[in-house]
Image: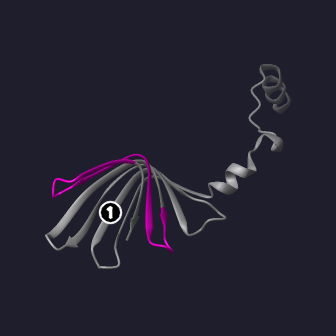
Amino acid sequence: MVAALVAGALFTKQLLWTPISAINMTDIVSNQFKMTGASFAGTDNNGEPFKIRAASARQEYDKPDEIFMERVSGTITRNTDQGRVVSDISANSARYNNIKKTITLIGNVRVNSSTGDKIFTDELVIKL
């Protein structure tokens, strides 16, 4: 009976195995930690809150201080001489550096401020 099952799988070519040579080890090592629907929040150096959401985020094995995000949106709050300003941000991708406390927004960057100011650019670095 077992021989018939094994032979049947061989004849129908429905083998469920992957040769080791087909595994992309670079991709496995580069994308060691990956999340979908990622969201994280914190405060900047002035104690003001920020919140970032991403469709997906990953942390590479050899870059533990950075988080790479795709389809990013969020809010950043800051105090200015004119009062409290809340900015909605969005970008195609972003890189959050935990050591430098920066978020680099990349591609189709949009910033809409509660003061009415708007920024449209390809890249923007925000120091938290």
- Look at the picture and state if 81 lies above or below 29: below
Q: Position of residue 76 (x, y in %)?
A: 28, 63
Seen from the viewer's position, the closer of residues 127 and 38 is: 127
**Which residue: 68% across, 52% down?**
28
- Look at the picture and state if 87 lies above or below 93: below
Q: Position of residue 82 (x, y in %)?
A: 13, 70
Q: Please state if 29 lies on the left or on the right of 123 as rendered.
A: right
Seen from the viewer's position, the closer of residues 12 and 115 is: 115
**Which residue: 80% across, 23% down?**
8
What is the three-letter code of the residue carrying label 1? Lys
Residue placed furthest toward the top: 11
Magenta span covers which residues? 96-121
Q: Is residue 108 inside the magenta stretch?
A: yes
Q: How is the image coloured?
A: one colour
Mark 1 — residue?
Answer: 51
Seen from the viewer's position, the closer of residues 64 and 88 is: 88
- Look at the picture and state if 43 lies above or below 58: below
Q: Is residue 107 inside the magenta stretch?
A: yes
Q: Residues within 10 Å of mark 1 (few under 14, many from 20)?
A: some
The quadrant of the rendering that contains the N terminus is top right
- Which element type, helix, strand or loop, lies under badge 1? strand
Q: How many marks?
A: 1
Residue placed furthest toward the left: 82
Instruction: Please tell me in which quadrant of the rendered image residue 12 appears.
Output: top right
Q: Position of residue 30 (x, y in %)?
A: 66, 55
The quadrant of the rendering that contains the C terminus is bottom left
**Which residue: 41% across, 52% down?**
54
Instruction: Please tell me in which quadrant of the rendered image residue 86 appears.
Output: bottom left
